[in-house]
Image (cartoon, rainbow, N blue to C red):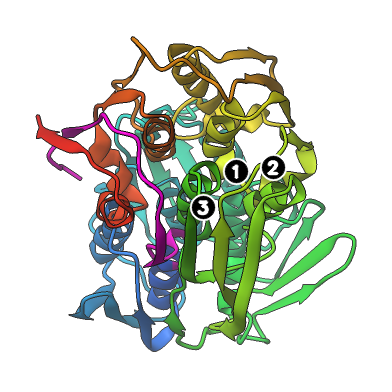
Amino acid sequence: MLQRTYSVKFSKKINRFNKKIIVDSDKSISIRSFIIGSISEGISRAKDVLESDDVFSTIKCLRKLGSKIVKVKKGSYEIYGKGLGSFHCKKNTTLDFSNSGTAARLIMGCCSTNPNIQVKLKGDKSLNKRSMFKIIKALEQFGAEFSPANKFYFPLNLISSDMPIGINFDAGISSQIKSAVILAGINSFGKTVVVEKIKSRDHTEKMLIHNNRAIKVKKGKKNLIEINGKESLKPINITVPGDPSSASFYAALCILNKNSKIVLKQVHINDSRIGFFKIIKNHNGKIVFKNKKSRSNEKIADIHVSSSKITSLNVSSKFFVSCQDEYPIMFAVAALLPGISVFRGINDLVNKESNRIKEMQKILKQIGVKTSATKDKIKIFGNPKLNIQNKQINVAGVLDHRILMSAAILSLVTGIKANLKNFEQVRSSCPNFLSTINTLGGRFEIKKS
């Protein structure tokens, strides 16, 4: 998706604040609502949808596959589903997922077992660098074909299976690959069984669970997800809650900023998504979930956060699945804490929108914070008394929303000047980031390229 590029400059430390804010809606749930609505029968409705670049890319690709999606008003959409196997398009139609790995992998899952699909798959510069090896190997088991042979990066060609049969699949840490297998299995003959040893995001299962003939989830030490293929799906009616990943950046800003408080309204607190808040709370962070309720099969709450004197972070590998997107901001927090913070089991961070270990090391080096990293561990030697004189954070050519947001928070907390190029990337997940920072009292300058 073409968009104007721009830089953002930060030059002043943020003052204390006491605010209530509405966080941008959840990206993962928003994207899934359009995809699942498109393969259901009847009219699905999605409200409070995140209107970000990644979501718009999802809608654009689904429309190319013949889906009718109508915007009713801001944040509200109707999806006119035509049932399983209803995707259709001209041979060699190009699906451009832009920066969205979620849209890419889930739509690949749907297309792999949809009859008579032959499409070209591509993304932006960042997505084209992300390996598709695991998703390709999973979908080839259904009979889908990918070319060129032995190429695992976009652009790629996909030809759907003409006789998809259900498979047995051992899921890893990726909820995207798990979801793609579920969606491929729904339109396959027979039963698909997904064994989940490490419990990842379960938004797909929650959105499908009212189709008890099509999917059953047996929870235990290992989750067992059974999909009965070719069972039609009922339409969905969903209100999308706030995104806990986006919320964590404002929480971090508050935690580190003296005499500050913030209430993050109506954020979903799905256990598979709130690792950041658990970690910070375990290290003396003042975080409380209030006004808890259930909406659209997701738990939501208002998250109350106050300035805190937290200890250095010791984060084990068990947390990785529940806060993959929050490691950059946790690295930023750790840089300003006394003592040495250690993060383990982080090797998969190299296959995100950027190599998030390397990019955060570069940023921390610019502000004078030492780090030491191996393949799956990083140590951050925190310094709460940084000398900010003659220092500047420069980020250029990094097409990663979470890296840019983390750099912005570091600048606002410390007062270190920052020049962040390609800041338009933040619109992929958090289009209201700058307006929210402005509401909290942060000041910045936007320069269009």
**Camera-side residue: 285 or 268?**
285
Which image quadrant: the N terminus? top left
First along the sequence among labels 3 and 2: 3
Of badges 3 and 2, the one in the foreground is 3
Q: Are marks 1 and 2 in contact (CB under 8 Å)?
A: yes
**Residue at x-position 34% and y-position 33%:** 155
**Camera-side residue: 84 or 129?**
129
Q: In the drawing, does residue 313 fall left or right of residue 125? A: right
For badge 1, the amino acid type reads Gln
Which image quadrant: the C terminus? top left
The residue to which callout 1 is attached is 324
Q: Which residue sits furthest right?
A: 221
Q: CA distance from mark 3 to mark 1?
A: 16 Å
Q: Are marks 3 and 1 in contact (CB under 8 Å)?
A: no
Estimate the x, y position of residue 59 in percent, counting from the top left: 28, 63
The residue to which callout 3 is attached is 251
The numbered dot on residue 320 is 2
Q: Residues within 10 Å of mark 1 (few under 14, many from 20)?
A: some
Q: In the drawing, does residue 304 fall left or right of residue 194? A: left
Q: Please determine whether, in this image, residue 378 is positioned above or below residue 81.
A: above
- Based on the picture, tell me whether residue 4 belongs to the magenta stretch: yes
**Camera-side residue: 126 or 10?**
10
